[in-house]
Image (cartoon, rainbow, N blue to C red):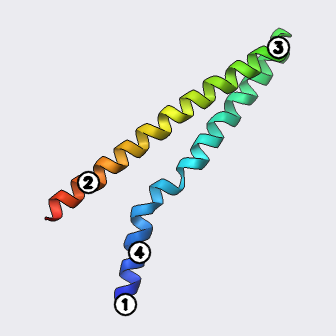
Amino acid sequence: MNEEKKFAEVLQSTGPYLTLGAQLAITVVVFFFIGKYADEYFETKPWLMVSMIIVGAIGGLIKFFRTVIDLSNKEENERRNKI
């Protein structure tokens, strides 16, 4: 039973990190499709698509790093409170 509790704690602490890659990928893909649609609408292929991919990647990376920093700070505060 003690091993199950440790395993559950590990999953609970790593769970938020497991979704970060998917969030980044989804952000870039969504911006790709927005850019592709805008290119078709305004007939500016491929410039809006490329620019939206760049915007999506930058925005996704900013969100990625903010989330990692927030989670790291949260874990550090929890460690300090346990001591």
Amino acid carrying label 1: it is Met
Task: Report which residue position mark 3 lands on.
Answer: 41
Task: Report which residue position mark 1 lands on.
Answer: 1
Amino acid carrying label 3: it is Tyr
Disc 4 from disc 3: Cα separation:
50 Å
Q: Quadrant of residue 33?
A: top right
Q: Nearer the viewer, mark 2 or mark 1?
A: 2
Precedes in sequence: disc 2 or disc 1: 1
The answer to whether mark 2 and mark 3 are in CB contact below 8 A is no
65 with respect to 80 (left or right): right
- Secondary element under disc 2, as helix, strand or loop, is helix
- Secondary element under disc 3, as helix, strand or loop, is helix
Crowd class of label 3 (few under 14; some 14 to 19; many from 20; radius 10 Å): few
**x, y (%) of residue 64?**
49, 40
**x, y (%) of residue 39?**
81, 16
**x, y (%) of residue 4?**
41, 84
Q: Above or below — where is 75 with respect to 41?
A: below
Disc 4 from disc 2: Cα separation:
19 Å
